[in-house]
Image: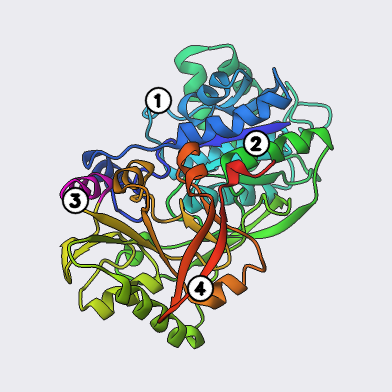
Amino acid sequence: MIGLVVNPVAGVGGPAGLAGSDGADVQHLALARGARSRVQERAALALTELAARHPGLVVATADGAMGADAVRAAGLVPRVVWAPGRATAGADTTAAADTTAAVGALAAAGADLILVVGGDGTLRDACAGLDAAASFDSMQDDTPDAGRSAGEGSDIWRVVLQVESGAGEAGAAGAAAAGAAAAGAVAAGAVVPAVLGVPAGVKMYSPVFAVSPRAAGAIAADWIDRDGLPTDDREVLDIDEAAMRQARVDPTLYGMLRVPYRAGRTQARKAATPVTEAAAVEAAARGAVARMLPGVRYLLGPGGTTAEIARQLGVEGSPLGVDVVLDGAVRVRGASEQELLAQIAQGPAQAVITVIGGQGFLLGRGNQQLSAAVLRAIGPDPLLVVAPEQKLIDLHGRPLLVDTGDPDLDARLAGHVRIITGVGTRSLYAVTAPELTPA
């Protein structure tokens, strides 16, 4: 059985220039800046792919915006096994504990593959739910098998039936109370379900995500067709966002998940640039600075290479934001999508971006301020790509990836791109969009 959990606020901080979406304060600030989460659109892409191959499929999920809404929208049948508390029921805001409890409830209900739509923080919460489930030795209730089947005799299953039958406030409240308990309610001896991240967050360093929502849906469909797929134990990594906004980037390992693997469809872990490549980064940055023209607004994206460009220009940029630089001066530091659009309207512009080591992404991972709307506003040549040559070599021929969420724009950006690799040196490298790659 396929399960689904959606974090309704995942990714909202990206277009707002907040380098993440963790915490209610950050989410409120992002909304105040005019940002919105695209998580429901990303969930829909995955589910539409799944529905095309398995129409009418029953998907175990959480209530409302945490999954059931997206399942119904895709023409599939939701089997609601958990609902958030009354304070968040039907709302577009949820807490980390909601994701943890929902994933645990799906495990208890027998889901063998759970799709989790969000970013690194969401997968961290999912990992916590499965850790609790795996540590639960047995489930004591009045069923003949002591709860090993999570059958209708169990208290948890009675709550599930109440929610599915629309038992009103009592059912929803009971489901909320049982959700945390369900996180530990996997039957003794049961296999912990596999989990696949559907990319919809801001920072996605963990190698637990499909390369795109559509790829996630295709993997889920294959899982059903083949009664499972090969899996890898992969790390769940996350970063303290408050520290990250101060340029202290130190991913922490929060656990391991069993992730279905398909070559080219599941993303790699983000790789940091080795210290030994500092000279190569400096040379690539010098090459980019030499090509900059007066009167052009350069939108410096996040990354070590672009930070070196800022240093050589003599400006102080934001650690992981997008900064607008015009003629050697910062016009906007840590700009949001709306601020970038306002700057582009004032004159020529170009986005300066680099390659995410190990993953190969150019767009869609950590630089969501450079949205499809921003890139279209820039014009026909929106990108100035800078990277040390070793980053390209380390991809072993895999193409670079663009994932703006706009299929037409992604198709336009696909093909080949010239990458500045040093002073007077450039490489021509292949670019594709995950959604253009056959699933």
Q: Quadrant of residue 92?
A: top left
Q: Earlier in the sequence, mark 3 or mark 2?
A: 2
Q: Secondary structure at mark 2?
A: helix
Q: Is residue 349 left or right of residue 413?
A: left
Using the rendered image of the protein, determine whether residue 7 is visible from the camera's viewpoint.
Answer: no
* Residue at image mark 4: 272
Mark 4 residue crowding within 10 angstroms, few (<14) / some (14–19) / many (20+): few
Question: From mark 2 to mark 4, how far is it between C-alphas?
Answer: 29 Å
Q: Nearer the viewer, mark 1 or mark 2?
A: 2
- Residue at 57% x, 24% y is 71
- Residue at 59% x, 41% y is 435
Mark 3 residue crowding within 10 angstroms, few (<14) / some (14–19) / many (20+): some
The disc label shown at residue 86, or none? 1
On the image, the x and y values in percent for residue 281 come to 43, 80
The disc label shown at residue 217, or none? 2
Amino acid type for the residue under numbered disc 3: Gln
Using the rendered image of the protein, determine whether residue 271 is visible from the camera's viewpoint.
Answer: yes
Amino acid type for the residue under numbered disc 4: Ala
- Residue at 56% x, 19% y is 72
Question: From mark 3 to mark 2, how far is it between C-alphas?
Answer: 37 Å
Q: Secondary structure at mark 4?
A: loop
On the image, the x and y values in percent for residue 258 come to 70, 52
For the residues bearing labels 1 and 2, Cβ distance under 8 angstroms: no
Q: Quadrant of residue 423?
A: bottom left
| Extent of the magenta region | 336-346
Q: Work out which quarter of the rendered image holds the N terminus and state it.
A: top right
Q: Is residue 312 left or right of residue 199?
A: left
- Residue at 51% x, 27% y is 83
Q: Work out which quarter of the rendered image holds the C terminus and state it.
A: top right
Amino acid type for the residue under numbered disc 2: Gly
Mark 1 residue crowding within 10 angstroms, few (<14) / some (14–19) / many (20+): few
